[in-house]
Every structure is written in structure tokens, then in C-alpha cells.
Amino acid sequence: MARSNDSRRVKQHIIEEWTGKILTSLCIVLLVVTIFSMVYFVATKGLSSFFKNGISLAEMLGGTSWKPEGNPPMFGALPFIFGSFATSMLAAVISAPLSICAALFMVEIMPKLGKKVLQPAIELLAGIPSVVYGFVGLSVIVPLYRDIFPGQGLGILAGASVLSVMILPTMTSIATDALRALPAGLKEGSYALGATRWQTLSRTVIPTTLPALMTGVVLGMARAFGEALAVQMVIGNAPHIPNSLFQSTSTLTSVITLSMGNTVMGSIQNNVLWTLALILLLMTFVFVFIVRWLERRAIR
Amino acid sequence: MKKSLMLVMTILLTVTLAACGQGSNTNNTASNTPDTSSNTGSTNNTATEQTEELSGSVLAVGSSALQPLVDEASKKFMDLNPKVSIQVQGGGSGTGLTQVSGGQADIGNSDVFAEEKLEAGPAAELVDHQVAVVAMAAVVNPEVGVDNLTKDQLVKIFSGEVKNWSEVGGADQAIQIVNRPSSSGTRATFEKYALGTKTEDLEGSIQEDSSGTVKKLVAETPGAIGYLALSYLDDSVKTVKYEGVEASIENVTNGSYLVWAYEHMYTKGEPTGAVKAFLDFMVSEAVHEDIVELGYIPISEMQVTRDVDGNITK
Amino acid sequence: MSAKTVDRIATGVIILFAGIIVLIMVGLLGFILVRGLGHISFDFLTSPPETIRAGGGIGPQLFNSLFLLVLTLIITVPLGLGAGIYMSQYAKPGKVTDSIRLIVEVLSSFPSIVVGLFGLLVFVNTFGFGFSLFSGALALTVFNLPLMVRITEQGLASVPQAQKEASLALGLSKWKTIRSVMLPIALPVILTGTILAAGRVFGEAAALLFTAGMSSPRLDFTDWNPFSPMSPLNPFRPAETLAVHIWKVNSEGLAPDAPEIAAGASAVLILTVLLFNLLARFVGRQLQKKFTASR
């Protein structure tokens, strides 16, 4: 009697064990399937402009003239690739010092005030939708730049300015985590040696957390690289490499949003847009690998 | 927890299955909802006086320029035919043509002839329904000081040959082009009928796809020139005459102003049922005033017609 | 210059930068709210939009945004919980787990426009869901899932090891332990994270342009049968969310009061996100209190 009861319980135990395992693995499988199908679909669409339409890779990546409706059509995407890198890097350059200082402020200088004022402020920035950023960019930043600088206000600097605010939360939260994770002994040792706060920060805290801080910068850049609507509204969208920061230019994302709806699926003009999306996708992988590499250095 | 999880999964599955069923329904055509019998009778009716009640759902996708009109018309149509549900989607002419050609939508709205976007095969399967005419005008920043531009001047401006307004009789200001992306139907129309030639995207030119943004930028940017559909014109920008002809509805209908295009609603094959009734409704008297109010020109008022190659007949 | 002076200058610079961030936030918020708040009224929040006449509202859009959020959460939460539990409890350290983790990471940093295009190709065209709430919810799930996985992992990691071991020692199966011991303890973290993630879903536009569509068919708010085409609950109808509506009004708006509508809708959107943040904090604190009190 007791025996059968036991075995039943064991059986139930095993069944339970397996339900859990199977249910959760199913979720994981679904996740993996999603990403693979995504890569697959975007890649097949994106590669068809090379295989089906016979555009050469060299023209796509190295060409500087983009005339999809021209005769003969030209598909040089270099201006967009350049535009994407220029805008996202500039955004990271603007945002990095701001976010690192914000993190230092919250962790090292005035944790209480930081938690009460700065943290909510940054969380809120993260919650503002990109459309609203674009809207504000077009109604405030563009006219401002038009008045101050030569040119029409639209361009890389306008795009980077909008993006830098958008990526601020990502960078700040990663920097904050890194600084918080720092063993207290390290700082205390430095203070005990008579170092001032800045000496401690600049010679001990920042160098030790540098890989983690860089992770934040790279992730911020990745986000800026993929942002579409806000950038499209303020960049001007001319398919040329600009001569200055204030001249209209394009990014990968802005071309896609601008033309995707106007082209017919399966046509060469549409296929090249998918190729641009594929480039975006591949760049995401590159960014993630850089982050991984940095993280490994941080652990060591 | 487990049970609730299962429950959620089950619901999801059910919903998904239902979706597949329903999705294919809407795709076929608008005619399969409970009472199919009522559909058959409706084909020969004008939309305003239904003898039998229409039902079904119609999906119209495409041109964002045409969307407001179809939207307004669909509201009226649904008031008259409460059992019909019409869904109007933007997404651009390309999307509209793709989806009607692929069978996902019943009607594909387009600013351009299907032949200009699709390959010959799929384009031949589509039936064109021209519902309105949209005219476009060149607009400039009010401070430019120009109120007429010839075709030649426009070509020179948009090809970058002329870089200052003083060269075409305006103020001493640099010209800033606010163009549309090369894939845009509005741009195709403007290039075809106003410039007569394709232009390239110049360095430093601005490109926006949406009329709202174009208007905002032309109004704010010194020396800016762009082009807009008549429905978007207002006092914030200055409308210039083309070859001395004002961009007015009258001039378009009598054929003296040439920068206009048809708004098309394509169906795959001849429409039936609710789709046909709605397309008939679009060109009926009931929508007439909406067309005018939205800045389009009703097809019925046009004294000239134009084919896909641009030949005009009176 | 003495070390002290340098220290003071550096501290000043840091405080200045922190101040700049707060200023940016206040400026942004002020700009949006000042322009938009005046336009918000009960009527604006409930009436349908107008194409050419002034006085349109954002009622359907607001409803769509909320409904889409609910749909997304219904799909995301169970999947995310499951995947998160697997990652933190069942997965054995090794190459496979590492690569799955990498995949989650990649997925979380995919540009939203690429997700939208994928949705257009697969959900809208291939699966034939059309431009619909359901397609939109699936696309948003792709976004939200990695976030949800990470949140669940974090939540489970916050459970004291002793609690888990005690439960296992009592002879409960691992699955039972996770469900009835660990999840309840991890709940505050998971819930707060979910609400914050929900706020982000609320403002997404790029992916929805291509999946949920840009129009809002007439809704019949008396018809709650989810299968009738005019029912607000029908998940297979196109639906324009608030964020997409702002984009549309801004770019193609014909109504004479389009700028005011855009400003008003932006303000509503921001206030909602603000509400989500406050709610997340409040819920987190309440649950924390409840658990610490009972212990």
C-alpha cells in the first residue's frame, strides 16, 4: 500500500518535472525559431537583389549614387551606410559624457538626490516614444540649427542631437549598474591613501569600469543605428554623402521608411530596400559581438 | 498556474485558428459572411438605393494621398449599408498594388497607373477604377518673391542649374529644393507633367514623403521650393503659376493646367458584390462634395482624359 | 593647480552635466505638455478622428493602443515567463545555453523597423493576417519577448537560494518549486519590469506602421463580439495606435487643427507612459511591503 503510494508519488513527481521542462523548452524553441525565421526571411529578400536582379555587392556597398528609378538604375548605398554610422557615432559621442556623468552623480556624488530626481528623469526619457522625439526635433531643433548654423538645419547634427537624448537612458543605466557593482574596497582604499574624489574616480573607478562603460556606449550606438522615424524626420533624406554636418543626408533606416510603401514587393526597387534592412540586421550582430567582447574583458 | 497557462495557450491557439479562417475570408472577396444570398442581387444596384442589403467586408489599401477621400466615402457608405465593413489602409501606392495583386486586399489605391509600378503580367490582371483627379502645384516660401515659373525654369531649378532665385526674377536667395523620394507617385506625376523629364536627387536637397512635412519645411525654410497636391495648399506657402496658368480646379478640368494625375482604385479582376457597390459609390453624386471638399476633382467634371502614356484627349 | 581644486572643478562638471539632463527632460516635457495639455478634454479623448474638419479626437486610437498592449501582454507574458524560467532554472551551462543567450541578446537589439518589415512579410502577407491588431501584437511580441525573458531571469535570480533548496528538500518537484515558491517571491521584480516594458510598447510606432496599419475602421462600441468586424475587440481589424496616429497626423494631416491634435496626442501618450512608470513603482512597493510584512 505504502509502496504503491510512493511509486505513484514518484511518478507524479516525474510527470511534473517533465511538464515544466517541456513547457519552458517550448517557449525557448519558439524564441529561437523566431529569430532564425527573421534572419532567414530578411536574408532571402535582401539577397535577391544580388542574385535575382544581379546587382554587384561592390556597387551596393561602395557606390555613391542612388538612383533606383533612374535609367540605368544605380544602387550605391554607401551614402546611407555613411549616414547611419556618422549619426549614431556622433550621437554616442554627445551622449557618452552626459550619461557617464549622470551615472557618477547618481552613484558617487549625490545618491539620494540622484535617485529622487535624476533617475526618474532618465526613466521618463526612455519612455518617450520616438515619434514624439522626431516631432520635437522637427519643431525645435531644426529651426534652431537653421538660425544658428549655415544650411537648412536638417542633417547629421540634427539627427545626432535627437538620437543622443534617445540613447541617454540606455547608456546611463548600464553605466550606473557598472559603477554600483564596483567593490567598495577599491574606492575606500583609494580614499584611505588620501586621494580626492576626482582622483579616485579618474584613476581607479573609471579605468576599472571602462569596459562596462564602453558596453553602454556600444549598445547606445546600436539603438541609434536602428532608430527610424525620429531620424527620418530631421535628417533631410538626400541620398548623398554630405559636405557638412548641416547638409541633408540619409541613413539606412530613413531610406527604408521613406520608400518601402511606395515600391511594389518583388520589384528591384523594393528588393534593394530589403538589402538595406539586411545590412541593418548584420550590423546588429556586429554590435552584439562587440558588446560580448567587451563584457569578457570586463569579467577578467 | 499551469492550468491558467494552458488556458491562455488554448485561447491563443483558438484565436489563431479563427484568424486563419477569417483572414482567408477577407482575402477572397468581400462576399462571404453569413448570408451570401443577399450579395448576388446587389451587383446591379447603384449604391444609394439598395433594394437588398449588402454585407461583407472590404479592404482597401494603398496611397496615403487617396486615403482621406476613401475614408470619408467609406463612412458614408457604411451609414447606408450598415452590414458592410470597409477598412481603409494607408501604406503607399506600392503597398496597395502589391496587396491587391497578391490577393491580400480587395482594392489597391494608387496615385500612379499600375503599369508604372508592376510588371506587365500582374498589371494586366488588375482593373483600373479612376475615382478622382488630383492636381499639383509648385509651392515656394512666401519670401521668395516669384509668382510664376515656366516649365524651363522649373527644370533648371530641379536639375540644379539655377541656384538662386534672382536668376528667375525673385529675391536674392539661395534655392532650397524640398523634393519627394524617387519612389513617390507624387514626384513621378510632377516630373512627368510639369518638368517633362526625370530629375536626379541633388546634393543638399531635402526629401520628404509626406505632404504635411513638405508644407512645413517649405513654409519655414528660406528660399524653399516644393510641390503639393491642391488639397494641402494654404496661406503658409505661396502657390506659383505654371506657365502663367493658375493651378485652379477650373483650369484643370478644361485642360489648360496639365500637372494632374488620376487617383486609381484597382481590383484584381472585375469587382463583385460589396466591392463593386463601393466603387460605384465612389464616383456617384453622394461622394461628389467630399471629393471637392478634400481638394480633389471629380472624374465627372473632367473635360479631358489622359491615358497611361500621357496623351490627352478632349 | 591643487588636487582639491581639480576635484572641485570635476565635481562641478559632473553636477552640471546631470543638471543638463534634468533640464533636457524638463524642457522636453514642458514643451510637449504646454502645447498639448490645452487641447486635452474629455471630448478629445473619446471622439473619433476627423479627416478634414477640425475637432477630431483620438478615442479609437487610445482604445487601440490599450487593447494592443493587452493582446501583446497575453502573448508575451506566458512565453517570456516560460523562456525565462528555462534559462535560469533548467538550462545547463554550456555552448547551447550560451548561444541561446546570445540569440536573446541579438533579438533585443534588433532595430524596430526590421522587426516591422519582418512582420509585414511574414505576419501580414505570408500568414495572411493582414494589417491587424494581431499582426501588430505578434511584431511587438518579438520586441518584448527578450525583455520579458531578462526580467524573469532577474526576478528568479533575486530569490534566495535557501528558499529554493528548502522547497526541494521537502520533496517538491523542481517545477512545483518554481511555480509555488520561486515565482511568488520573484513577482514584484517581474511585475515592475513588465509594466515598464509595457510603457515602451505603448509608444512604439515604426514596427506598427507596417503591421497594425494606419487606419481605424469605424468601431461599434456596443458590439462586443470579438468576431464581428466592427467590434472593438476583434483582433483581426486594422488598428491605428496613438503613436502611429501622431506620425500620420504630422505627416499627412489635412484637418486644420492637425498640429494641435498631434500636440494633444503626444501629451496624452507621455502622460500614459508617466502613469505606467508611477504604477510600476507603486505596485513594486506594495508587493514588497506585502511580502516583507507576511514574513
Image: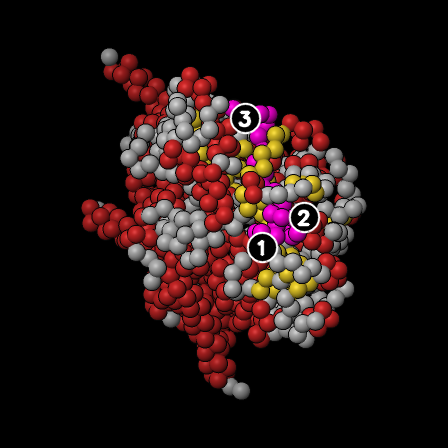
**Secondary structure under the numbered disc 1 in the rendered image:** loop
Identified at 72% across, 54% down, the residue is B195
Q: Which residue is mark 1?
A: B248
Question: Which mark is first along the chain, 3 or 2?
Answer: 2
Q: Which residues are magenta?
A: B249-272
Image check: B14 left or right of A273? left
**Secondary structure under the numbered disc 2 in the rendered image:** helix
For disc 1, the neighbor class at 10 Å (few under 14, some 14 to 19, many from 20) is: some
Considering every residue shown, the one lying at the far left of the view is: C294
Residue C285 x %, y %: 27, 53
How far apart in space, not on screen, are marks 1 and 2 (Cα)?
Answer: 20 Å
Residue A208 x %, y %: 53, 63
From the image, state whether disc 1 or disc 2 is nearer to you: 1
**Secondary structure under the numbered disc 3 in the rendered image:** loop
Any mark on residue B271, and which?
A: 3
For disc 3, the neighbor class at 10 Å (few under 14, some 14 to 19, many from 20) is: some
Question: Tag 1: residue type?
Answer: Ser
Which is nearer the eye, A248 or A193?
A248
Question: Which mark is first along the chain, 2 or 1?
Answer: 2
Report the chain holding disc 2.
B
Image check: C12 left or right of B258? left
Identified at 54% across, 26% down, the residue is B271
How far apart in space, not on screen, are marks 2 and 3 (Cα)?
Answer: 28 Å
Considering every residue shown, the one lying at the far bottom of the view is: C1
Question: Tag 2: residue type?
Answer: Ala
Q: Work out whether residue C13 can be spotted.
A: yes
Residue A229 lies in magenta, yes or no? no
Any mark on residue C21, and which?
A: none
Q: Which residue is mark 2?
A: B188
Question: How was the colour assigned to the protein in this rendering?
Answer: secondary structure
How far apart in space, not on screen, are marks 1 and 3 (Cα)?
Answer: 33 Å
For disc 2, the neighbor class at 10 Å (few under 14, some 14 to 19, many from 20) is: many
